[in-house]
Amino acid sequence: MKHRFNLSILTWLLASTFSYTCAASSTLPDIDIPQDEASKKRGAVVYYNLCRMCHSMKYIRYQTLGDIGFSKTEIDKLRG
């Protein structure tokens, strides 16, 4: 029993050290994330088509879709 406990502690220490080393040595490139109206609109459409299948749209304020460039008819079409 004690051997199994020591092995689990050793495994945890190795895994945590490895994950810390990987996180410290990795760097992400600087990228420009587009903030234009077309990009926001595409993101909303992607969310509507993919994410809403599992995640609720219960708290979406449809008025804010107009702020990113959707017309009233497009908003009504998204609402269903």
Image (tube, rainbow, N blue to C red):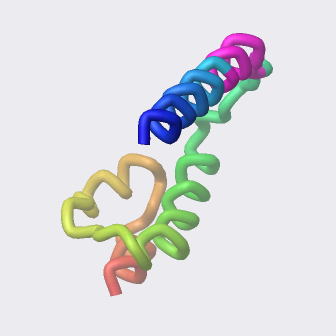
Residue 12 covered by magenta stretch: no
Residue 13: which quarter of the image?
top right
Q: Is residue 19 left or right of residue 69?
A: right
Q: Position of residue 30 (x, y in %)?
A: 75, 18
Relative depth, front residue between 19 and 71: 19
Nearest the viewer among 6 and 45 is 6
Choose top left, top right, bottom left or bottom right for residue 59: bottom left
What secondary structure is the stretch in magenta mostly built from? helix
On screen, residue 19 above or below 80: above
Residue at 56% from the left image edge and 55% from the top image edge: 43
Query: Residue 78, how many percent across, how many down?
Result: 40, 77
Quadrant of the snapshot with the C terminus: bottom left
Q: Compared with residue 66, is residue 16 higher up or lower down, i.e. above or below? A: above
Count of numbered circles in the view = 0
Which quarter shows the N terminus? Answer: top left
Task: Give the magenta range.
Answer: 18-28
Q: In this rendering, does residue 30 appear at all?
A: no
**Looking at the image, residue 27 lies above or below residue 12:** above
Report the residue that reaches farthest toward the bottom. 80
State the residue at coordinates (40%, 74%).
54
Can I make out residue 45 in this image? yes
Give the x, y percent position of residue 7: 56, 34
- The spot of residue 53 in percent (x, y) is 43, 78
Q: Based on the displayed image, in which of its 4 quarters is residue 41 positioned? A: bottom right
The reply, left or right, for residue 27 in relation to residue 67 is: right
